Amino acid sequence: MHPGPPTNESSRIQEAPWWRGAVLYQVYPRSFQDSNGDGIGDLAGLGQRLPYIASLGVDGLWICPFFPSPMRDFGYDVSDYRDVDPRFGTLADFDHVVRQAHALGLKVIIDQVWSHTAVEHPWFTESRSSRDNPKADWYVWADPRPDGGPPNNWLSWMDGPAWRWEPRRRQYYLHNFLPQMPDINFHCEAAQQEILAIARFWLDRGVDGFRLDTANLYAHDLQMRDNPPAPPDQRGDSPVLMQRHAFTMDQPESLAFLQRLRTEMDVYPGRMAVGEIGGADGLTTMLAYTRGGTALHTAYAFAFLGARPDAPAVARQLAPWAEGEGEGWPAWAFSNHDAPRVATRWAGGDAATFAFGGPASAAAAGAGPLTWMALLMALRGTIFIYQGEELGLPQSDVPFEQMQDPFGLANWPLIPSRDGCRTPMPWAHAAAHAGFSTAQPWLPVDPAHVDRAVDRQEADPESMLQQTRRLLALRRANPALQSGACRVLWAEGEVLLLQRGDGPDAILALFNLGAGEAPLPPILAPEAVSQSPLLWASHTDLTQASRLPGGAALFLRAT
């Protein structure tokens, strides 16, 4: 069903900054569109597909790293923060993408990976050369213990200790990720100043904001105390998930830096920063980093990037953000380049996530991609859709011999490789490599994705793609869904009932997140459902049903 006409929530909501309630489309450029036939997606290819992104009805896009890099972690190991890797094109290509996106009414935010660099970065080349050079303190260095071992028990997210010996300095350097990705020292004023200058470089080029990678890992504990063990119920399957990261995450200096960044960004009207927040208690950090409007504009954690939540679990995440201007602002994503695709992950099974979550528990099968897209559109916050999520793409099973992901290789076979969510975008079902490239792609095109290619779904008025467009149009047409208050009216078992907004423009969003039928919430009379104006529904005649089928979702005008 198609959304109803635009409504008029309060003028306060209408005047909210563009990013409050916006929907942004995440592009992993390496896998989006190849324009030059080398099997790797690039900025020119992204430019070719910008009209498609605009046709979805999103407000903008987030572009994953495209900077010069040795590509050990596929761009998240930066060797030059002020240029474009030749694999992706040139600065002129990037400038063209920004101009074209703006002409289409799309905002552009880009990744900034400031917690670490590649070892090839000139800063590190200088820093490692001696203990008294001008950049000696730009990275985290520590003397060995008396027995020659590393200074503490900190572990890398990419396997093994988080320290590597540097013979030139006779010291260890910190690397929270790969050994070839040394951590920048955020206790160094000169390093902070240079990072802020990098932010100004891209803001001056016209970007509308930044997605800040690992934003709560910037600073480390100066005393370098050992991390304690994680509580038994929070322990994961890899060693790094067996610690509580008390001294490597959420240090006060990280928040202080983000406050400095906010001061710089406020000079540029209409810009925003969204932080990626890791840790077992990401919600608390999200609140701390966004509250009061002095640091991040918004932030997201990994609450919805693990196992499928039931209705009470969704309600717990939404509760702190119900309404109000000064209490911070959340961002939400169900899929991204680091997590198994939601169409598979929430369909059932045991799919652990990369990064900061514990083991994912088994989730009952039931609702599908359309249910999850509808739920995402109902949330109060800034929303991210990952490329292919609008097509309902499942997770790909990349054979070990074709895997590229360093995290997947280090943890195989226990934890899924991130390659499975990074396979090429399927554009045309009958074209070579599904229209992504004329050459063999860097990762194989998933045969299961070909039947879900964009061209096939464009031709089907009831496809996942077309339903996603309707849901995006519904959210855009109703300020109550963008920035209105969010009240959980019912959250028991698999049934969730939300009220978005107040007064005559309020909207009810009802979901059955489970596999089987479920009764309507007792606080919602059947006649209220059947007589309220229907804005969108996942099933035909859903308003006439006395019970909700598995995966049901509907939006009603509250009366």
Image: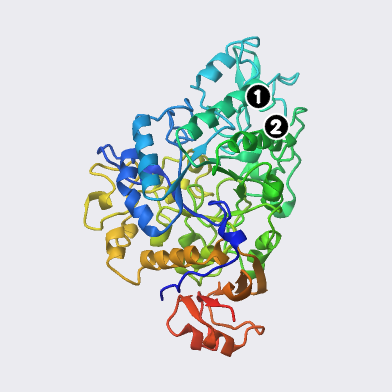
Image quadrant for the N terminus?
bottom left
Circle 1 residue = 140
Instruction: Check residue 220 in the rendering and tell me which mark sits there, or answer none.
Output: 2
Element on which disc 1 rests: loop
Q: Earlier in the sequence, mark 2 or mark 1?
A: 1
Can you give x and y, in whole percent of width and height, for residue 496 in the image? 61, 73
**Label 1 packing within 10 angstroms: few (<14), some (14-19), many (20+):** many
Can you give x and y, in whole percent of width and height, for residue 342 in the image? 49, 59
Instruction: Check residue 543 in the rendering and tell me which mark sits there, or answer none.
Output: none
Q: Is residue 157 left or right of residue 335?
A: right
Q: Is residue 27 left or right of residue 183?
A: left
In the displayed structure, would residue 11 be above or below residue 246? Answer: below
Q: Are marks 2 and 1 in contact (CB under 8 Å)?
A: yes
Element on which disc 2 rests: loop
Give residue 247's quadrant in the image: top right
Residue at 37% over, 64% down: 465
Q: What's the amino acid at mark 1?
A: Val
Give residue 156's quadrant in the image: top right
Disc 2/disc 1 C-alpha distance (Å): 9 Å
- Residue placed most toward the observer, 326 or 511: 326
